[in-house]
Image (tube, rainbow, N blue to C red):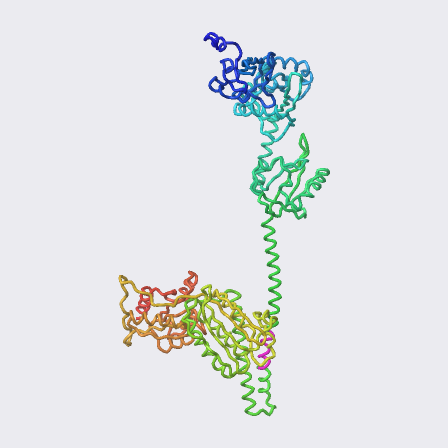
Amino acid sequence: MPTDLGKFILEEAPGGIIATDAHDTVLFWTKGATEIYGYDGDEARGHKLAELTGMPGHPVKHEFGADFEYLRRRKDGQAVYVSAACKAVFTPQGEVQYIIHSQKDITDAKAQRDARNVESRYRGLLESMPDAIVMANSTGRIVLVNSQAERLFGFAPRELLGKPVEVLLPNRFRGGHVSHRAQYFVQPRTRTMGAGLELYGLRKDGLEFPVEISLSMIQMEEGAIVMSAIRDIGERKKAEQKFRGLLESAPDPMVIVNTRGEIVLVNSQTEQLFGYQRQELLGKPIEILIPARFAAHHPAKRGSFFEKAQPRAMGAGTELYAMRRDGTEFPVEISLSPLKTEDEMLVSSAIRDISGRRQIERKLLEQKLELEQASKAKDRFLASMSHELRTPLNAILGFGQLLNNQKLPLSMTQRYAFAGNIVQAGQHLLHLINETLDLAKIEVGAVTLSLEPVALDDLLHEASKMIEAMAEARAVKVYLGEPKGLHVRADRIRLRQIVLNLLSNAVKYNHKGGQVWVDTGTADTGRAWLAVKDDGPGLSPEQLSGLFQPFNRLGQEGGSEEGSGIGLVLSRRLAELMNATIDVSSAVGQGSTFTVGMETAQPQTLPPTGANEALPPPAAALGQRNKPVLLYVEDNPANLRLVQEIVKLHMDLELLSATDGNSGVAMAREYRPDAILMDMNLPGISGREAQRRLRRDPATRDIPIIALSANAMPLDVEAALEAGFVRYLTKPLNIKEFLEVVGEALEQAR
């Protein structure tokens, strides 16, 4: 500019003066422009004018030499209506060098003008409407309100005209509303009442209240006008809050749906059951909660319910399923109740998850089926058992009747033969009864095991000796594999029972001159195995399927070999109690192999005694003996050797031993030891039964008896002490505790 006076005049001139280059970049910006748009000169210079003041749908105008009006945007986002004129400054070559923009804020004048136009056209119509009506122009200024709106918001007549529509909103919403309003004018659309938005109005006295608002656009020659119909829903909100409180207090999830199938209200129980947040459900179709295979047919059923709406109680006999947000389905019961409101018909659904009940019903059904199967199995078991018991009884009674008939001319040889048959049948009957009782004990959980390290080599050697006579009688050779030094975790008595059963079967059901191989080893899994293989006739697939069924002798019922059909069943059940398995492989003409898989164990060794542990002194001699006597009743050789070593190293006494309950009782009566160390799980009779017999005998009733067992459960210990055992030691032995307890028992006997 040529002089400072010229700059001063431009800066202080009314309105705003803006200079841009030919590409719309701001070069000059006066204080008047700042007052209109809110940008100072430094902020504006260097930016495109359209970027600073542009409104979507209202491009910058360059109508040189003519005045025009258009809608612009302030820095704070507010719309401003301006009157503008442009003049171009050209270069000597005739190209545009500068564009001078002269602008004036006529927002208020525009509002007054729009108000006059709208007033003349719509005042009578708006006054006849029941709702509060507020009309605003494109700058957001109020151009018309009806008396209902003035009363609703507490303003005097015409007091609202020309004010920004945000004056009717709470402060926290005003900033966001400006941008929403501007966007609405770019993309106008009709919005009906109750569009699911949480809206609030503000009265002149500062009181907020909830509202519903419908919006519609009116195009006039002077520009677009937005008409807002506003409804105070405070009373309805109170009613809804009261109703929502009732919903929240309901024990079941509640879902309220309108005639279009849209969810309009849910309680927190619904959120918890279905995994949705409340806002995720509101306005969504109810089919969102229904599995896809049912959802397609649900709208028709929903429509028929609304046509003839009546309550439907829970458990109406319909198989219903619902679906959670994660897609999982679950069975439900649903009650339906129609709700008549001012606006429309709704339906309230109370939903109950019955997964637990269905699970209980399934379990009851399964238990019923199991009981039925168990009853059938029991009937089959009793029928088979009756047959098996009658077979030896037939021989006993038959030969007994022959012996009892004095009229028969029986020779002495015949009498001996008949008596032998009776004894043999009786022994078979006793064996059958014992195995049946053992199986029954396992079924009711009455079998107690003593799990400890068992040396497989020793056990196999012992078992092979026990079947030598049977094998020799049938000319069957039994071969034991090379000793492997393996130890397994098992109950020694029960494992020996399993091995004896497998060996006796391999011998009995072999051919004359047959062979049996026994071997042990470890598998890749780290478990030990014991295999018994024979070269007998083998088993067919049908026979294999019935191998472990009680009293099923696989067609050998009429054979020459006696058997109960229980041994393998009993062996498998015992193996399972020891975390062991029994598997079989066989083929007709190729023999059979039975394999027992077991947990490996470290051999039981003499635990070291700490140097700082004071050991009790040796027990004093009792009576006329030079040394006190301790009787140890134990069937496990490794445990027996351990106690022998402990006594040899730490105690001055004489140690006697017995390997079963009956011999232990006999030795106690014969030698009258000063104390007895009694294992609880013994062959023949248990340690508890042996102790009971010794207590009944006056000669042994006062001998202190110490219980020893691998069972360390408190109930086992308590039961033994209540039965009269003086102390209860558990395996593996703690040497210090063992010496103290034995020493106390010997002192008690003095």
From the viewer's side, name the closer residue of 64 and 682: 64
Q: Position of residue 725 (x, y in %)?
A: 39, 67
Q: Is residue 454 left or right of residue 67?
A: left
Most extreme residue toward the front is 93
On screen, residue 271 above or below 6: below
- Secondary structure mainly formed by the magenta segment: helix
From the viewer's side, name the closer residue of 562 and 31: 31
On screen, residue 736 above or below 164: below
Q: Quadrant of residue 739?
A: bottom left
Q: Position of residue 491 (x, y in %)?
A: 44, 68
Q: Quadrant of residue 265?
A: top right
From the viewer's side, name the closer residue of 513 and 459: 513
Q: Which residues are magenta?
A: 386-395
Residue 100 visible in the snapshot: no
Whether 19 is among the magenta residues is no
Quadrant assignment for the C terminus: bottom left
On screen, residue 12 above or below 572: above
Most extreme residue toward the top is 5
Residue 563 visible in the snapshot: yes
Q: Quadrant of residue 737?
A: bottom left
The mark tally for this picture is 0
Q: Position of residue 446 (x, y in %)?
A: 49, 66
Q: Position of residue 588 (x, y in %)?
A: 59, 75
On screen, residue 298 above or below 578: above
From the viewer's side, name the closer residue of 372 and 306: 306
